[in-house]
Amino acid sequence: MAPNTEFRSKIQVFEPHRASLPPLIPYLKEFWNRRSFAIELSKFADKAEYLGSKFGKVWLVLNPLLLALVYFLLVTVIRGGSTKVNGLTTLAHILIGLFTFYFASNCISAGAQSITSGGRLILNQAFPRALLPFSSSISSFQTFLPTIPVYIFVIVVGKFFYPATQVPRLAWSFLWVPLVVALVGITGFGLALLFATMNVYFRDTNKLLTYIIRIWLYLSPILWQPEMLHGWHRIALYANPLGPVLAATSNIWINGKTPTISEFIGAFAWAFGSILIGGYFFISRERDFAVRI
């Protein structure tokens, strides 16, 4: 009897190999064709995360909002010396900066765990493994979206009581928001690929990542204004993977201005640099994941 070729074509053999890239065009085509798998996996993960919670998805907004209020108290009330108008501007800056930062950090932290937590799926199904961090990035984006109406509500109410605040009601610069959000997502996804690979080989990566993200938050222009850095000190802003894009976010939402050319160049450089480096390390080693998890 002739062998069942249809069955044989589905057999996978996992063995250690030297890190090398597979043919990229077929890989990217399969990744795109299976994007619906990542979307459905993201929906399932969201339902599972808030299954036993009474507030459910309210925590998507409540967590960063409460944290922003805590930081606002630390930066303004305890420090003292801020007027109510400047206090509203500071709150607006912290809110939009924190919401944007948590979009990227959620991409990274969830993506870093996506391979080790998806071990059974990896062993039993054949698909581009990059879909798992991509699914985590989709979930992070869905978490980010509800925060924007909350931010707008806070600012509209704040401007009603303090119309002198500099936060703009509406500006043409807001047309740049989709591009800036896309750059944040690309940067987060690229770094998620990098840390997901590291987490397969060094399981302590996920624990260290918690502290890295916390320090990263304090080094980013969220609790402080980008304009505070002058001269050569601005190098610290552009050395931060999220520095230029957070400065661009502040320019759009707080100052009502178009981001500067240097902010765009820095944001694009970090976005595509992270996706290229993270993608190379991940894809070149993903065939080794099954024998290490």
Image (cartoon, rainbow, N blue to C red):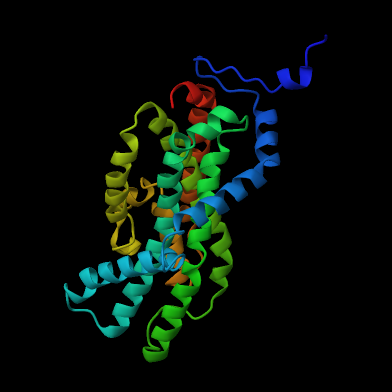
The number of numbered badges drawn on the structure is 0
Q: Is residue 19 above or below residue 69?
A: above
Q: Is residue 38 visible?
A: yes
Q: Is residue 202 above or below residue 34?
A: above
- Between 184 and 43, the one lying in front of the other is 43
- Between 130 and 76, the one lying in front of the other is 130
Residue in the image at 27% along x and 49% along y: 215
Q: Quadrant of the N terminus?
A: top right
Q: Is residue 183 visible?
A: no
Q: Report whether 290 appears left or right of 74.
A: right
Q: Is residue 266 above or below residue 283?
A: below
Residue in the image at 78% along x and 17% along y: 5
Q: Report whether 63 appears left or right of 132.
A: left
Counting from the top left corner in percent of width and height, residue 31 is at 65, 37
Counting from the top left corner in percent of width and height, residue 255 is at 43, 72
Residue in the image at 44% along x and 68% along y: 58
Q: Quadrant of the C terminus?
A: top left
Residue in the image at 46% along x and 44% along y: 270
